[in-house]
Amino acid sequence: MRNWGAILIWFGLLCFCNCTSDNERLSTDLINFPETASSIKGNDEFPKIEFENPVLDFGTIAAGKRISHSFKFTNTGNAPLLISNVHPSCGCTVASGWTKTAIQPGDGGVIDVIFDSTDRTGVQSKRIDISTNSKPALSQLYLKGNVIGPDFTTEDLK
C-alpha cells in the first residue's frame, strides 16, 4: 500500500509553490519584447534613464521618523526603457514601487522609496541600485541626512 501521507505532503508543496504571488515580478513577456537593449542594432539607439535629482538630502530628523520620496525620471534615450529591479542597500530602506511597464523615449516614471530611521542615529547615506536595459545598466539613487536620538536638543535641529 502506498504512503498517502507523503503523497499529500508532496502535492501540497507543489500547489504552494505554484500559488505564490507574482504581483511584484516583471512579466516574462518582457523577455520577448522586440525593443529591449539586447535586440537593438545601432550603438546610438539605447534607452537612457535620467533622474531629476538622484540624491535626496532629508536634513536632520528625529529617530523613528519615516521619509517617503518619489524619485522622478525620464527616458532620454532612443528606445523603450525597462526597469528590471530596484534594490536598496539596507533593510531600513524599501523600494515601495516603481514603473513596471516599458517607458517610451521622452516619457517618464517614478521610483518610490521609504527610509525608516527607527534604531538609526548619526549621519545616514543609503544607496538604491536600479537595474535597467539602458547603458549603463546600473544606476544609483541616494538618501542622505542626519538622524538624532532621544537625547537631542533644539540646537541639534538647526
Image (cartoon, rainbow, N blue to C red):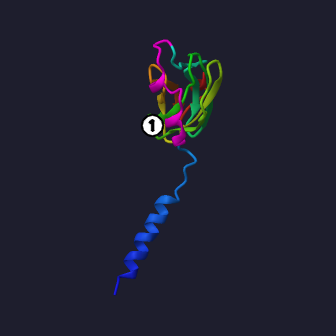
Q: Is residue 41 magenta?
A: yes
On the rendered structure, is 136 left or right of 143?
left
Q: Residue at x 53, y 18 (%)?
A: 48
Q: Position of residue 50 (x, y in %)?
A: 56, 18
Q: Determine the residue positioned at 49% across, 65% down.
A: 15
Near-viewer residue (50 or 127): 50
Where residue 148 sits: x, y (%)? 53, 32
- Residue 5 relative to residue 69: left or right: left
- The N terminus lies in quadrant: bottom left
Judged from the image, the secondary structure of the residue bearing numbered disc 1 is loop
Q: How many marks?
A: 1
Q: Is residue 5 shown above or below 26?
A: below
Towards the viewer: 80 or 72: 80
Q: Quarter holding the C terminus?
A: top right
Q: Which residue is found at the position 35% from the left and 83% from the top?
A: 2
- Look at the image and tell me whether residue 150 can be seen: no
Q: Residue furthest right?
A: 107
Residue 120 covered by magenta stretch: no
* Residue at 48% over, 63% down: 16
Q: Is residue 59 above or below residue 99?
A: above
Pointer 1: residues within 10 angstroms few (<14), some, or many (20+)? few
Asked whether 10 or 149 is in front, the reply is 10
Nearest the camera: 26 or 71? 26
In-image side of 127 versus 103 (left or right):
left
Residue 40 appears in the picture as rendered: yes
* Residue 69 place in picture, x, y as percent: 62, 30
| Residue sticking out furthest to the bottom | 1
Residue picked out by circle 1: 90
Magenta highlight range: 26-44
Query: Compared with residue 52, is residue 3 higher up or lower down, i.e. above or below?
Result: below
What's under tag 1, amino acid-wise? Cys
